[in-house]
Image (cartoon, grey):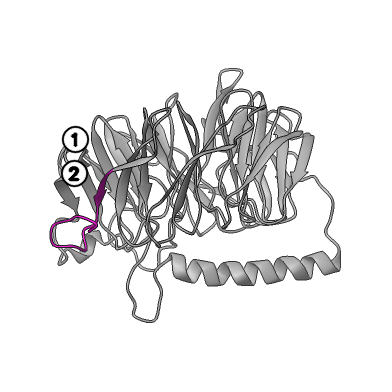
């Protein structure tokens, strides 16, 4: 069953505004995909951590595995591709967060390939794979990160060609007969969950739509039209899909039938995905604010970080961790009635932070645009403390 899109049609003036936004977005993408004057590849330094190992998709097109520990610099375990001469394995850059699932590390590359690497050694020789097969030319970049459906054992990979691809995680074989086709680029990493025992995925597109599909069949269940590009990862919360748009609105849609439950308007784009602690929704905005909303979309508090927020925040036991494009990391009290919202602040250099944050216990892992990766300790009632900082551009891999 496919339901037609919903929502108000934009006036001609608003269409002109959106055209301007898309033009600005194109400039942003040119920086994001590394197509600068020097031709140097670039990404967002996105990362994940699993079993004491940090996996970084570096801005220069490498995957680096770092052994986390008690020292002031992590130990490099392996790098993929292992040498600069291996042009057949070129990544160009990584923007979406890697994921570890089904015993493999999945990386979506700006080169247009999805990689499944053995997390032990970073190879594709025995257990890993790369899709599409062969050496196809002119592949569209993969800006969004991959998503994993545990019910079907399937990894989903959105693409700049407007398609959502599905592969068996173990083998890399196609899961659907044909990929799902949206109307434009997909930068939105899908949110995966279940409704009535059915595996579902929700994601947005540059065509202004939010899509819900049945993962088992690849069939579209519904779509909902917003007033702008939908680039962030949706949040499944209490039977609703919470998703932001470049029309400056945050939408709450019924996950089953796409009916609008409420909408909340900020002062700029909602790019980074929202997160929840189970009772409240925390939505970062390009206006620099984090908006805390209850289930009904009523504002409980807001905090101005002082600079645009592209990085998806994370929750740690001590509060909500938020990073802005000025390289500042904040720990906020996530409760409703706090008299002091900002608990702690740490400036992590001058480089922009655009990659999603990642947390394990009390530790926050941050990838910055200068190529550095940091582990920050956020233990309650203590200052934010940089545990270590790794930068491959320095001889000793230290940041200073």
Residue at the extreme bottom of the image, as rendered = 37
Residue 191 locus on image (x, y percent): 54, 36
- Say how many tags the image has: 2
What residue is rendered at 18% in x and 35% in y?
Answer: 70
Residue at the extreme top of the image, as rendered = 196
Question: First in sequence: mark 1 or mark 2?
Answer: 1
SS of the residue at dot 1? loop
Residue 64 locus on image (x, y percent): 23, 50
Nearer to us in this view, 263 or 191: 263
Magenta span includes 363? no
For the stretch drawn in magenta, what is the main secondary structure?
loop
Residue 1 locus on image (x, y percent): 70, 34
* Residue that carries the numbered disc 2 in the rendered image: 74
- Is 330 left or right of 292, judged from the image as shown? left
Q: With respect to residue 374, does 162 lie above or below?
A: below
Residue 11 locus on image (x, y percent): 86, 63
Point out which mark residue 69 bears.
1
Q: With respect to residue 273, does 288 lie above or below?
A: below
């Amino acid at each position: 069953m496919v339901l037609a899109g919903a929502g108000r049609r934009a006036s001609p003036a608003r269409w002109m505004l959106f055209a301007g936004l898309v033009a600005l977005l194109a400039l942003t993408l040119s920086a994001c995909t590394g197509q600068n004057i020097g031709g140097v590849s670039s990404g967002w330094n996105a990362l994940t951590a699993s079993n004491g190992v940090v996996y970084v998709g570096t801005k220069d097109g490498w995957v680096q595995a770092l052994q986390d520990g008690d020292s002031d610099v992590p130990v490099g375990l392996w790098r993929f591709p292992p040498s600069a001469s291996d042009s057949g394995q070129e990544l160009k850059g990584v923007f979406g967060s890697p994921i570890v699932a089904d015993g493999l590390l999945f990386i979506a590359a700006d080169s247009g390939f999805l990689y499944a690497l053995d997390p032990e050694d970073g190879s594709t020789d025995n257990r890993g794979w790369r899709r599409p097969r062969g050496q196809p030319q002119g592949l569209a970049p993969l800006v969004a990160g991959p998503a994993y459906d545990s019910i079907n054992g399937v990894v989903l990979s959105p693409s700049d060609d407007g398609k959502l691809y599905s592969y068996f995680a173990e083998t890399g074989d196609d899961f659907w007969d044909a990929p799902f086709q949206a109307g434009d680029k997909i930068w939105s990493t899908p949110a995966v969950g279940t409704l009535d025992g059915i595996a579902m995925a929700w994601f947005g597109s540059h065509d202004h739509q939010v899509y819900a599909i049945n993962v088992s069949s690849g069939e579209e269940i519904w779509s909902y039209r917003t007033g702008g590009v939908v680039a962030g990862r949706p949040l499944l919360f209490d039977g609703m899909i919470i998703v932001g748009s470049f029309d400056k609105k945050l939408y709450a849609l019924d996950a089953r039938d796409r009916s609008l439950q409420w909408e909340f308007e900020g002062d700029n784009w909602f790019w980074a995905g929202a997160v929840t602690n189970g009772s409240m929704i925390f939505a970062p905005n390009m206006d620099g604010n984090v908006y805390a909303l209850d289930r009904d979309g009523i504002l409980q508090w807001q905090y101005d970080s002082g600079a645009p927020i592209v990085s998806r925040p994370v929750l740690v036991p001590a509060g909500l961790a938020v990073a802005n494009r000025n390289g500042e990391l904040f720990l906020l009290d996530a409760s409703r009635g706090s008299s002091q919202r900002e608990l702690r602040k740490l400036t992590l250099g001058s480089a922009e932070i655009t990659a999603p944050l990642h947390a394990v216990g009390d530790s926050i892992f941050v990838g910055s645009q200068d190529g550095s990766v940091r582990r920050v300790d956020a233990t309650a009632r203590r200052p934010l403390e940089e545990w270590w900082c790794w930068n491959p551009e320095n001889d000793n891999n230290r940041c200073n």
